[in-house]
Image: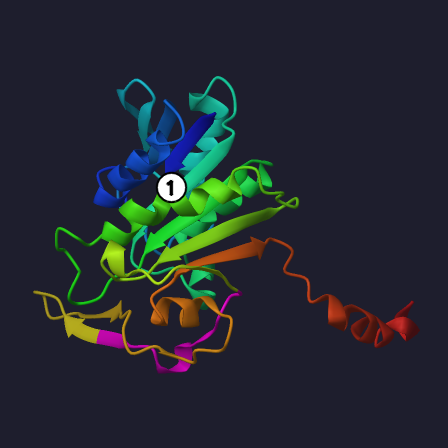
């Protein structure tokens, strides 16, 4: 099996090393093509206003001066001589839960793989103040990653779907299990914007990632993580609200 590994935290991110270790448990044909710099929050964006450069570090190891989506596109079109059987994106340092996935470069790299018809999985390690930056920051992902991926390797994936996995901020031995979940929702109306001044006295604003309210609805990814479980969420790329189509179409009938 050929595996492509990418992320949004950048080529030198520790989570990418963790993901390579996980991928190596399934194959010795593992390729890396990741952004050369951190691209958190890049979403499913492409680099269109400047050239994208490709750097080769070693055999089957590349970095791209662009977004996670750029990295997957470059891997599939320029780097690899044949497409991978599996794309793994991550392991992101931080959660990609609920509607955070719309901002996530980690998930977006997997989206690009799904668009190309390749089985794609995004992986993220939730962290807490206690685990952030410490030696055990990725402990749950490192121990549970292969266990969670294995059942997905021969599971049927519908067209234009992917799977989003989040690991709880717990010691590996304290993870409470694995749950298949639906996407939760945050209340972004209470998110933070931090204002400051640069050395020249000009104002700037920094988007904060804390103080975002959420409700732990039953069956959601948020609830699973809160209760110490690995969350496995199948996602689809069809954003159409099908229940609204008929009623909305009726409003335009007189226009033909």
Image spot of residue 83 (x, y percent): 52, 25
* Residue 54 % position (x, y): 34, 27
Residue 13 vertical position relative to residue 64 in the rendered view, above or below? below
Viewer can see residue 155? yes
- Name the residue located 54 percent from the left edge and 38 percent from the top edge: 119
Comparing 1 with 183, the one in front is 1
Q: Is residue 67 above or below residue 204?
A: above
State the extent of the magenta-drawn residues as a range: 182-194
Q: Say which element carries label 1.
A: helix
Locate residue 9 relative to residue 187 in the image: left or right. Answer: left
Give the image location of residue 171, x and y in percent: 22, 58
Please state if 200 lies on the left or on the right of 36 as rendered.
Answer: left
Which residue is pictured at 47% across the width and 25% down the height?
A: 1
Say which quarter of the image contains residue 221.
bottom left
Residue bearing mark 1: 146
Label 1 neighbourhood size at 10 Å, few (<14), some (14-19), many (20+)? some
Q: Within the magenta stretch, is there residue 185?
A: yes
Q: Is residue 13 above or below residue 208?
A: above
Residue extending farthest left: 199
Which residue is depicted at the point 92% across and 74% down?
Answer: 254
| Residue 45 appears anywhere in the view | no
Is residue 138 inside the magenta stretch? no
Q: Position of residue 111 (x, y in %)?
A: 52, 46
In what quadrant of the picture does the C terminus appear? bottom right
Q: Residue at x 34, y 30 (%)?
A: 24
Quarter of the rendering containing residue 89: top left
Q: Is residue 148 above or below residue 71?
A: below
């Amino acid at each position: 099996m050929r595996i492509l590994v990418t992320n949004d935290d950048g080529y030198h991110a520790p989570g990418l090393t963790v993901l390579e270790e996980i991928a190596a448990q399934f194959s010795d044909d593992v390729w890396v093509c990741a952004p050369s710099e951190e691209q958190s929050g890049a979403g499913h964006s492409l680099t269109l206003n400047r050239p994208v450069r490709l750097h080769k570090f070693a055999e089957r190891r590349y970095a791209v001066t662009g977004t996670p989506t750029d990295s997957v596109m470059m891997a599939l079109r320029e780097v690899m001589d044949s497409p991978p059987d599996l794309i793994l994106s991550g392991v992101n340092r931080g959660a990609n839960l609920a509607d955070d996935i719309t901002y996530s470069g980690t998930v977006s790299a997997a989206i690009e793989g799904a668009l190309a018809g390749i089985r794609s999985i995004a992986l993220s390690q939730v962290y807490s103040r206690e685990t952030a930056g410490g030696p055990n920051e990725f402990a749950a992902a490192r121990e549970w990653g292969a266990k969670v991926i294995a059942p997905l390797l021969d599971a049927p994936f519908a067209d234009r779907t992917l799977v989003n996995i989040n690991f709880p901020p717990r010691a590996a031995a304290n993870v409470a299990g694995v749950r298949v979940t639906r996407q939760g929702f945050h209340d972004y109306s209470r998110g933070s914007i931090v204002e400051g001044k640069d050395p020249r006295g000009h104002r700037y604003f920094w988007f904060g990632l804390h103080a975002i309210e959420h409700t732990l609805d039953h069956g959601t990814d948020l609830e699973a993580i809160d209760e110490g479980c690995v969350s496995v969420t199948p996602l689809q790329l069809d954003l159409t609200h099908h229940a609204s189509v008929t009623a909305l179409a009726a409003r335009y009938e007189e226009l033909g």
